[in-house]
Amino acid sequence: MENNTHLPPEDPPSEERGSVGPFTMEEYELVEDILEALASSDDDSYSVYVNVIVEKLNRILRFHALALDMPEPGSAMGGFAQNEEGGLSGIFKEIVLFNPHDFELRLPSRTIFGKALIDLEISFWGFLSFGIERVFDHTEMGIGFLKSVEKHLSARVYNRMTAELLVSVATNGAVDRTIREKSVNYLARLWEDNTIHAMRNFAPLMESIWNARKEAKVVMGTMMGIQEMFDMQIHGATHYFLDFFAEHAEDEEVRGAFREFLFGATYEELAGKDRERRTKGVVTTSGMDLTSMGLRKGGDTTMREKALGIYRFFTKRKLEAQARFIAKAPGPKQTAEELLLIYFIENNL
């Protein structure tokens, strides 16, 4: 079988830059190793995977080049400028006052390209993950490839969630204007680097919380969430998570949002469990579908499904919070992540 795995991009990798298009050198070399393993196989049917992977890889590299060709935020054509104090100025400053329903259409072209690029990369890493499972089955090499691929897939899913959170904060009229402006600033600057793998500032904090939530056990018990928060700390959640909750423990909005996050259930479902607690003193997870929020459990759950489960979990809570806000219904009007992101921005973490 013809080995066409090494197709260098027009902009070749450099040690100084440490990336190939939007891929880190580690990611790019992993893709090359997978392609070499497929191309060296005696099974000619594997050539189909090689061709599709190469095609998808080159498409992403071309798309990334187009994104970089867009006017940079900061240029006159880019629609973004900073005043002498480092804040937003010009037409871009007013974006935070526009109708939130068309906010994303007003973003600079480069930011729009960057956000679309994340979706392409999620599709790419997802295809690699499924392909490795099918081609390499449960071989030692396949397990090693799968673990690495799903780590990078998870990172891209978290990138997408972070971008969505920034949009949520920027378009929330109830949030202080200064915070909204900073969210727009971060969103516009998020795609400037040659690689978007490493998010700035608060993103690693959010990732530590999401990673810990994937592993934390749901106990419920007294419905205070103490056991669940302790378990998240054990699994590596940033200490700012507990700091924020301790500072706002008396805030009903915060308590409601965090209980949804910790227990993996809606505000409405938890209200029923509260009634059970008042009657019996302690509650259990019996009678609750803890997968309804997208959090699949089980030792055989792949890293891919855990990451996608966290995304489903986040999306469901975000939509329900928005619905409560519109209907003026009881319950949290923001997700725990949005509240945390505002806290991170306010405290320059």
Image (tube, rainbow, N blue to C red):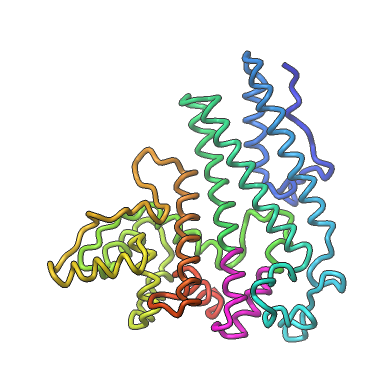
Q: Is residue 70 magenta?
A: no
Up-down: is 341 above or below 291?
below
Could you tell me which residue is drawn at 61 percent across and 47 percent down?
122
Which residue in the rendered view is the most extreme toward the left? 280
**Residue 125's spot in the image, x, y percent?**
60, 42
Quadrant housing residue 107: bottom right
> Which segment is the magenta one?
163-187
Residue at the spot 68% in from the left edge and 64% down from the top edge: 190
Question: Is residue 212 or residue 52 the one in the foreground?
Answer: 52
In the rendered structure, the answer to whether residue 208 lies left or right of residue 180 reads left
Residue 181 belongs to magenta span:
yes
Residue at the farthest top position: 42
- Count of labels shown? 0
> How far from the left and from the top, in percent, is residue 310?
46, 54
Q: Is residue 29 left or right of residue 332?
A: right
Q: Nearer the viewer, residue 42 or 117?
A: 117
Q: Position of residue 23 (x, y in %)?
A: 68, 47
User: Could you tell me which residue is drawn at 55 percent across and 82 percent down?
Assistant: 175
User: Mostly what secondary structure, the magenta segment?
Assistant: helix
Identified at 73% across, 45% down, the residue is 60
The image shows residue 138 at horizontal and vertical percentages of 46, 26
209 relative to 185, above or below: above
Name of the residue lying farthest toward the front: 327
